Image (spheres, helix red, strand yellow):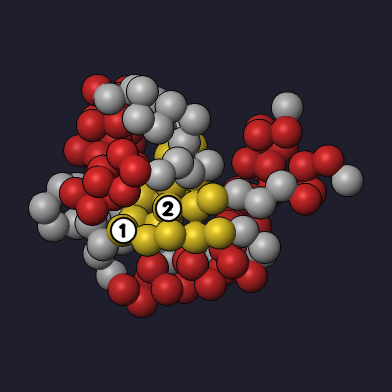
Amino acid sequence: MGTASRQLRFLVVDDNEDIRDVFCRLVERAGHVASTAVDGQDAVEILQRDSFDVMLLDLTMPRMNGVDVVRWMREHADVAPATKVVVISAWAGEHRAVLQELGVETVMQKPLRIQQLTDLIEETLRDVGS
């Protein structure tokens, strides 16, 4: 049984409501919990109140973009130290070097395939379980 019964908590951060809804449905259909943030500023406020296993993070958003969210998280390491940041963006390529510098290991291209999210959930469950 072990990690298979572990329910992960996801924070889906995207300024596009349709994308947030799709990601939340996929996460919930896989048996996990999903919360949403409408932009980076919203995400930072939520991270200060709640904890998550995984944050699915868009890069291009108003008020505070994804790179700035990751920078904020690194500057406030006590806030979400165990949260795995997964950048999901159509434009991640130009930011890849900065994201790597900031410690983001997983960058996925939009549109995201269901299998990619399924694989991510399984990988995270293994990481959390070890």
In the image, residue 112 above or below residue 45: below
Say whether marks 2 and 1 touch (CB < 8 Å).
Answer: yes
Q: Which residue is mark 2?
A: 11
Measuring 54% from the left and 50% from the top, which residue is drawn there?
A: 9
> Quick check: 40 left or right of 51?
left
> Quick check: 65 left or right of 13?
left
User: Residue 30's spot in the image, x, y percent?
Assistant: 66, 64
Amino acid under disc 1: Ala
User: Residue 85's spot in the image, x, y percent?
Assistant: 43, 39
- Would residue 37 be seen by someone viewing this image from the given angle? yes
In the image, residue 59 above or below residue 130: below
Q: Earlier in the sequence, mark 2 or mark 1?
A: 2
Marking on residue 119: none
In the image, residue 72 above or below residue 123: above
Dividing the picture into quadrants, the one containing residue 99 is top left
Amino acid under disc 2: Leu
Marking on residue 37: 1
Secondary structure beneath dot 1 equals strand
| Circle 1 crowding by C-alpha within 10 Å: few under 14, some 14–19, many from 20 | many
Measuring 67% from the left and 63% from the top, which residue is drawn there?
A: 31
